[in-house]
Image (cartoon, rainbow, N blue to C red):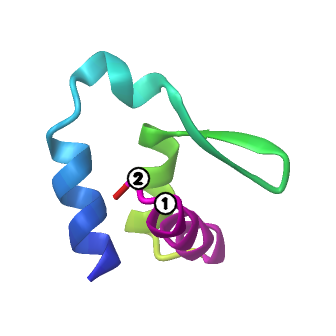
């Protein structure tokens, strides 16, 4: 469900916004584009990104 919410939000972002930092994970800045790659690959980092985006009410 979180993935669907992420993809819906991501698809509606202007292309230039996708290069902006949306969140930090383990002190590393994560752009929308990197977040999508991590989520697409179903990595642990991707799961953490999804959890943080939901907790912060970004998606």
Q: Which residue is mark 2?
A: 58
**CA separation in Å, label 1 and label 2:** 5 Å
Asked if the magenta segment contains residue 24, the reply would be no
Q: Position of residue 44 (x, y in %)?
A: 64, 77
x, y percent for residue 40 = 38, 65
Q: Quadrant of the N terminus?
A: bottom left
Q: Which residues are magenta?
A: 44-58
Q: Quadrant of residue 17?
A: top left
Q: Are marks 1 and 2 in contact (CB under 8 Å)?
A: yes
Residue 42 x, y percent position in the rendering:
47, 76
* First of labels 1, 2 by sequence position: 1
Secondary structure category for the residue under label 1? helix
Name the residue: 22% across, 33% down: 13
The residue pinned by badge 1 equals 53
User: How busy is the neighbourhood of tag 1: few (under 14 within 10 Å), some, or many (20 plus)?
Assistant: some
Q: Is residue 21 left or right of residue 28?
A: left
């Amino acid at each position: 469900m979180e993935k669907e919410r992420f993809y819906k939000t991501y698809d509606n972002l202007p292309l230039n916004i996708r290069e902006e930092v949306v969140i930090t994970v383990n002190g590393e800045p994560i752009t929308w584009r990197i977040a999508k790659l991590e989520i697409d690959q179903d990595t642990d980092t991707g799961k953490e990104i999804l959890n943080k985006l939901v907790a912060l009410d970004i998606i």
